Image: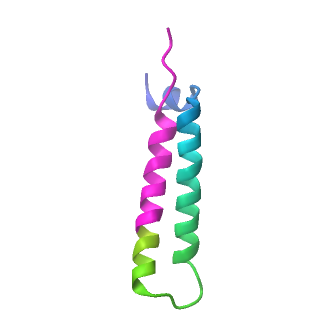
Amino acid sequence: MNIVERYQKPTPKFFKVLRNIGVALATAGGAIIAAPIALPAALITVATYATIAGTVVTAVSQAVVKDED
């Protein structure tokens, strides 16, 4: 199974929920990073980590497929 076939197969419900959480986390982190106002460095650092974590969770959750019997 190549990567294109894997991404086209159905994803289990748990990983769909996890994927949506990852998308929200990445979006929120990106919005904080792109804010046009000055924010504390600690908040920017946390937002950067949240963006990276959300992106990774989204990619991994999307690659999980249901087992075919």
State which quadrant residue 28 falls in: bottom right
The residue that appears at 43% across and 70% down in the rendered structure is 48
Write down the region rendered in magenta: 49-69
Question: Is residue 53 found inside the magenta-colored segment of the image?
Answer: yes
Which residue is outermost to the top? 69
Whole-percent x and y of residue 61? 49, 40
User: Which colour assignment does the render follow?
Assistant: rainbow
Above or below: residue 20 compared with residue 33: above
The number of discs equals 0
- The residue furthest bottom is 38
Residue 20: where, in percent of width, then height? Answer: 59, 48
x%, y% of residue 18?
Answer: 53, 44
Kindly indicate the quadrant of the structure image that contains residue 45.
bottom left
Q: Residue at image x 40%, y 66%?
A: 49
Please tell me in which quadrant of the rendered image residue 40 appears.
Answer: bottom left
Point out residue 9 in the picture as x, y percentages from the top left corner.
Answer: 56, 25
